[in-house]
Image: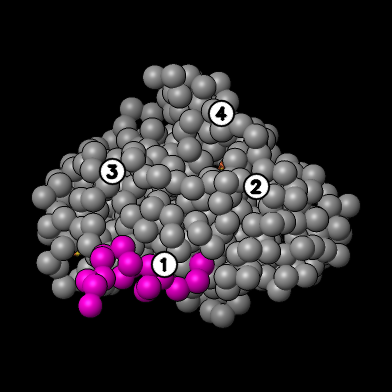
């Protein structure tokens, strides 16, 4: 009998891509300093055309995908969003629009409702206009409030997402009060993950341990007060844990992301991983991409792992953590995620946390001061793509 190779074994074990995320465009009117889009997004040209997105939907659904996220950039920048939603609905997906709210108006929300959109997740940068606008380098706070009003009026559940970091985490009480005023049923307080633009701005965005603990306390007290009325998810930043999260539940196990140019990714940040042969939906079927492409099999199973993960009893629980974090911090995507205190590189995380305990020169950004942050915009992206 022929021996089964680790790749064949990994393929055999791969279930269907239950979660499909379509990053419809990298265009976005906002310029968030923590954006998870690739830093070199300006180099990504030629978004997929409508018929190509529809084919992706059909093929992924045929493989068993059921949950659909529509994000970007700002997905409302695509004029064919309603058409994509309608096809997704026809195919039986549960559809979730992940939006900054900019570009949502009465006409579009009506059209999206008619197309069968199930769910809208709206992001805010902060509870104050000053910081919301500073962090996104736009004047969008009121526009977001109007988007929230439209979402409520059209009977969607109110689902808010606020990315937390050093500059806004002390406002967590006010952010939750804002969510309560808006009538939110779900609030995700997601601490920044340090990839993409957040990686460039890490030293300005990483909170101190004290800030994180205070924010958790405030969140707990708020939860007790509001009870079942509002469900609040507080995602602790990786850097303050001793074990990594099971990133994507293991690459190539349930999540499939398609970037605006058709690149298929086992995680939305995976474009950064060197040597990962990522397939494109313009050239291959979703079935081949998911089951057979070298890019999707590269980190399936456990055969790729180095020590200490390879012989670790916890590897089936966390899959060695995040490949992008391992690469960014250690230069090798096969290493254990340095968040893990068994990693020989764990000091890289504890040193960053120790630096974050020190006060910074300009703790409270003023709109008048020259920003010392990299904003996610085309000019910076072009400049950084050259360097
Ligand atoms: S994080 Fe901000 S800049 Fe990035 S896609 Fe979302 S709204 Fe746009
Ligand atoms: S050594 Fe690897 S598998 Fe073990 S707990 Fe740490 S990251 Fe997870």
How would you rate the neighbour count of disc 2 (Cα within 10 Å): few for under 14, some for 14-19, many for 20 or more? Answer: many
Residue 61: x and y, percent? 63, 69
> Residues under labels 1 and 3: Cα distance?
20 Å
Magenta stretch, residue numbers: 1-17
Q: Disc 1 to disc 4, how far (Cα)?
A: 30 Å
Mark 1 to mark 2 CA distance (whole Å): 22 Å
Does residue 340 appear in this view? no
Q: Residues within 10 Å of mark 4 (few under 14, many from 20)?
A: some
Tag 4, which secondary structure? helix
Graded by Cα atoms within 10 Å as few (under 14), some (14 to 19) or many (20 or more), the crowding at tag 3 reads: some
The image position of residue 248, as x and y in percent, is 41, 62
Q: Residue at x 32, y 57 (%)?
A: 299
Q: Quickly name the residue at label 3.
A: 327
Q: Earlier in the sequence, mark 3 or mark 4?
A: 4
Cβ of disc 3 within 8 Å of ligand 2?
no
Q: Which of disc 3 and disc 1 is earlier in sequence?
A: 1
Which quadrant of the structure image shows residue 94? bottom right
Left or right: residue 182 versus residue 80 is left
Instruction: Tell me the distance, in whole angstroms, between the alpha carbons under discs 4 and 2.
Output: 15 Å
Q: Is residue 251 above or below residue 269?
A: below
Residue 143 drawn at (x, y percent): 74, 44
In the rendering, which numbered label is found on residue 192? none
| Residue picked out by circle 2 | 24
Q: Report which residue position mark 4 lands on.
A: 42
* Residue at horizontal 38 percent and vertical 29 percent from the top: 362
Label 1, on which residue?
A: 253
Name the residue: 39% across, 34% down: 201
Quadrant of image for the N terminus: bottom left
| 317 displayed left or right of 38 | left
Front-most of 293 and 113? Answer: 293
Dot 4 or dot 2: first in sequence order is: 2
* Residue 223 placement (x, y as % from top left): 49, 73
């Amino acid at each position: 009998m022929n021996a089964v190779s680790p790749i064949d074994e990994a393929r055999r074990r791969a279930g269907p891509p239950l979660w499909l995320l379509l990053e419809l465009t990298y265009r976005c009117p906002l310029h968030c300093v923590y954006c998870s889009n690739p830093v070199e997004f300006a180099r990504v040209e030629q978004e997929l055309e409508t018929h190509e997105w529809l084919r992706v939907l059909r093929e992924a659904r045929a493989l068993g995908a059921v949950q659909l996220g529509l994000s970007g950039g700002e997905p409302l920048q695509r004029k064919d969003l309603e058409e994509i939603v309608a096809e997704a609905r026809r195919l039986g997906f549960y559809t979730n629009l992940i939006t900054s709210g900019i570009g949502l108006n009465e006409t579009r929300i009506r059209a999206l409702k008619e197309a069968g959109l199930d769910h809208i997740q709206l992001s805010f940068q902060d509870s104050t206009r000053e910081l919301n606008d500073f962090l996104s380098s736009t004047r969008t706070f009121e526009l977001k409030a109007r988007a929230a009003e439209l979402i409520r009026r059209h009977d969607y559940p109110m689902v808010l997402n606020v990315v937390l970091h050093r500059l806004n985490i002390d406002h967590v009480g006010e952010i939750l009060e804002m969510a309560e005023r808006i009538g939110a049923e779900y609030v995700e307080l997601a601490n920044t993950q340090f990839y993409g633009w957040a990686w460039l701005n890490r030293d300005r965005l990483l909170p101190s341990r004290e800030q994180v603990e205070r924010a958790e306390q405030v969140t707990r007290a708020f939860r007790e007060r509001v009870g079942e009325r509002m469900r609040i998810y507080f995602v602790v930043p990786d850097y303050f844990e001793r074990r990594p999260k099971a990133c994507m539940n293991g690459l190539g196990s349930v999540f499939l992301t398609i970037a605006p140019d058709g690149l298929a990714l086992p995680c939305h940040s995976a474009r950064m991983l060197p040597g990962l042969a990522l397939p494109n939906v313009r050239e291959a079927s979703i079935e081949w991409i998911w089951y057979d492409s070298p890019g999707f099999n590269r980190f399936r199973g456990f055969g790729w792992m180095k020590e200490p993960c390879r012989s670790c009893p916890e590897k089936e629980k966390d899959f060695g953590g995040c490949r992008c974090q391992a690469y960014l911090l250690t230069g090798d995507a096969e290493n254990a995620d340095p968040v893990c205190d068994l990693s020989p590189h764990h000091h890289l995380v504890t040193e960053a946390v120790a630096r974050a305990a020190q006060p910074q020169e300009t703790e409270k950004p003023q709109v008048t001061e020259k920003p010392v942050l990299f904003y996610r915009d085309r000019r910076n992206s072009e400049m950084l793509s050259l360097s």
